[in-house]
């Protein structure tokens, strides 16, 4: 049954509320703890009972951090790393060009700097070299170094690793194949011979665990290793930006990392926060939508290693210059993305959005934006999405998945079946290269594999809500208490509430397509709301031209900090006429 009777909202969605079982659980939690019902709805959704509330609301990294040695090859990897440090061997770091790769590299560079050592950073060009180690780069690095550490890549790179001619350690999280490269150590929670208990870790978290193990081995020799807690800002950034689920230890890593980041001790992140006009303590939202995209922009449309260098620099002036350059690259990326997104959505709609997979391919689409466009397509269709840029006889693309559908495993199977030139990734994101003449066959087969996992069954028009609030009940204090149940992100979405039967007192267009709204229930309380891109669809025009009509509004609560004054703001996602017409 539709929540508040909304079968089709202004954005064409059916609203769904908490199940009867979830309502009962949140009510029981409210009675047992005395906490606000809105908070208990969030806790109940996470499966938390009264006995587990305290630990969930204040997760302890000490209690949740796994023993690094629970991962295969970890002791060997850390020992080889320390041997290189102690013998002053030449170390190279081969990193992926995204936030996770850059953060992973910065972690190693930071640790080495504190030990009085340094390393060569190598980040491949997305267009010229593509993802992961390649033979020419590994040969060149191997000729000049004693140890190459591959971070956020390498698990499927058998030939390039063999070509290195020196010791190689892999610290990764992408899905592994039946065999591993011939290397000193491959630490990866998604190896096929791992239990999967830590499969949700991003690569930076794997690197962090390796440094924990390295410090432990140093302690066993009576040597104090570098401070690791101060590096958690990098782990938090990578975890959120790589869309790793915020469950288990990931929640604790991000919460602690946000506290570290708020101290503004890392010049690169401080400069980037200033460029992004971040005036409050950072949240997971800022990591995913303010800082992450700018760091990624270097690898997408600019200089591939710029993000990693920004995160690892200790010079504030250098950080400022790099942050400004990344901001420029990000503006270029947005312009390219908008053009590709419009074409991809039109193509996917023409193909039909009722299947298990939404996909599009276009001539010359920039490989640096296909992943972002795939993410947008996934959000709009509630289906796994693939977007491919065609060039000559091949196409290079990226995919994004929805909860419960393992895209990386399906892509890897396509590669094994010969329908892709290469492909890999993890549950929520993947990359691929496909021959132009096999494109249709590959996407048809991918659709079959995803359908077996239930892709497309949820429908594109469902908006899930956690409960109902009245304007007078939405306070800054309530939002702070709800944030204690965070951080929110992949695997732990921020709660979305409905405000039923409210009157619009103010509505106007701001910027190119955004909507600013004020609303209340007639009892004195009033809330401001913002909806980005509302005028790109029916939401903006309908609310701006309300003519006194009352609406149900739905969105996520946040604190607006302006001029030192804090107030409640609703990030408006959707609306529906209260009269049902």
Image: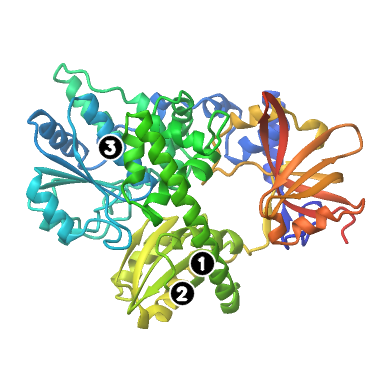
Closest to the observer, 144 or 422: 144
Question: Which residue in the structure is indicated by mark 3?
Answer: 70
Question: Which residue in the structure is indicated by mark 1?
Answer: 340
Up the image or down, 1 lies above or below 466; here it is below
Q: Secondary structure at mark 1?
A: helix
Q: Nearer the viewer, mark 2 or mark 3?
A: 2
Q: Nearer the viewer, mark 1 or mark 3?
A: 1
Closest to the observer, 391 or 539: 391
Q: Is residue 216 left or right of residue 521?
A: left
Q: Which residue is at 50% across, 44% downward?
A: 288
Separation of disc 1 and disc 3 at Cα? Answer: 43 Å
Say which label, 2 or 3, has the lower sequence index: 3
Say which label, 1 or 2, has the lower sequence index: 1
Question: Which residue in the structure is indicated by mark 2?
Answer: 362
**Mark 2 near mark 3, Cβ–Cβ under 8 Å?**
no
Q: Within the image, what quadrant is residue 86 found in? A: top left
Say which label, 1 or 3, has the lower sequence index: 3
């Amino acid at each position: 049954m539709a929540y508040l009777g909304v079968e089709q909202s202004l954005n064409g969605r059916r609203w769904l509320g908490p199940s009867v079982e979830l309502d009962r659980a949140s009510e029981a939690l409210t009675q047992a703890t005395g906490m606000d019902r809105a908070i208990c709805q969030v806790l109940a959704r996470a499966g938390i009972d009264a006995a587990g509330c305290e630990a969930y609301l204040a997760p302890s990294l000490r209690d949740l951090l796994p023993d690094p040695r629970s991962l295969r090859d970890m002791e060997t990897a850390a020992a080889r790393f320390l041997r290189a440090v102690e013998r002053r061997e030449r170390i190279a770091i081969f990193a992926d060009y995204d936030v996770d790769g850059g953060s992973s590299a910065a972690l190693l560079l930071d640790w080495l700097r504190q030990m009085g050592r340094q390393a060569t950073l190598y980040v491949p060009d997305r267009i010229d070299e593509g993802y992961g180690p390649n033979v020419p780069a590994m040969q060149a690095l191997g000729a000049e170094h004693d140890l190459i550490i591959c971070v956020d890549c390498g698990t499927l790179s058998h030939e390039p690793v063999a070509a290195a001619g020196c010791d190689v350690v892999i610290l990764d999280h992408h899905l592994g194949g039946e065999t591993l490269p011939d290397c000193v150590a491959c630490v990866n929670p998604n190896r096929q011979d791992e239990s999967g208990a830590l499969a949700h870790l991003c690569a930076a978290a794997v690197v962090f665990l390796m440094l924990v193990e390295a410090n432990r081995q140093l302690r066993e020799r009576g040597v104090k290793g570098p401070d690791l807690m101060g590096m958690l800002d990098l782990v938090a950034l990578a975890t959120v930006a790589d869309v790793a689920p915020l469950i288990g230890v990931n929640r604790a890593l991000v919460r602690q990392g946000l506290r570290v980041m708020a101290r503004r001790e890392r010049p690169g992140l401080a400069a980037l926060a200033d460029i992004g006009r971040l005036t409050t303590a950072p949240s997971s939202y800022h990591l995913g939508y303010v800082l992450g995209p700018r760091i990624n922009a270097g690898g997408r449309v600019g200089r591939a290693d710029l993000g990693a260098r920004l995160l690892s620099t200790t010079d504030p002036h250098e950080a400022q210059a790099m942050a400004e350059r990344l901001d420029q690259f990000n503006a270029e990326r947005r312009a390219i993305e908008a053009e590709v997104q419009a074409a991809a959505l039109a193509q996917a709609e023409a193909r039909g959005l009722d299947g298990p997979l939404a996909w599009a391919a276009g001539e010359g689409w920039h490989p640096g934006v296909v992943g972002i466009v795939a993410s947008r397509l996934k959000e709009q269709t509630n289906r796994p999405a693939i977007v491919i840029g065609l060039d000559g006889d091949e196409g290079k693309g990226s995919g994004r998945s929805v909860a419960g559908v393992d895209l990386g495993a399906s892509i890897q199977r396509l590669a094994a079946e010969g329908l892709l030139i290469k492909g890999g990734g993890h549950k929520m994101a993947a990359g691929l290269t496909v021959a132009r003449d096999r494109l249709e066959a590959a996407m048809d087969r991918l659709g079959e594999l995803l359908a077996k996992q239930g892709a497309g069954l949820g429908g594109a028009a469902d908006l899930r809500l956690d409960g109902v609030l009245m304007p007078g009940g939405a306070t800054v204090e309530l939002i702070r208490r709800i944030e204690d149940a965070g951080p929110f992100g992949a695997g732990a979405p921020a709660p979305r509430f409905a405000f039923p039967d409210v009157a619009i007192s103010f509505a106007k267009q701001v910027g190119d397509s955004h909507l600013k709204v004020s609303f209340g229930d007639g009892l004195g309380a009033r809330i401001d709301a913002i909806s980005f891109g509302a005028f790109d669809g029916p939401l903006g025009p309908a609310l701006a031209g309300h003519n006194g009509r009352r609406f149900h509004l739905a969105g996520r609560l946040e604190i607006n900090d302006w001029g030192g004054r804090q107030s409640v703001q609703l990030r408006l996602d959707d609306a529906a006429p209260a009269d049902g017409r």
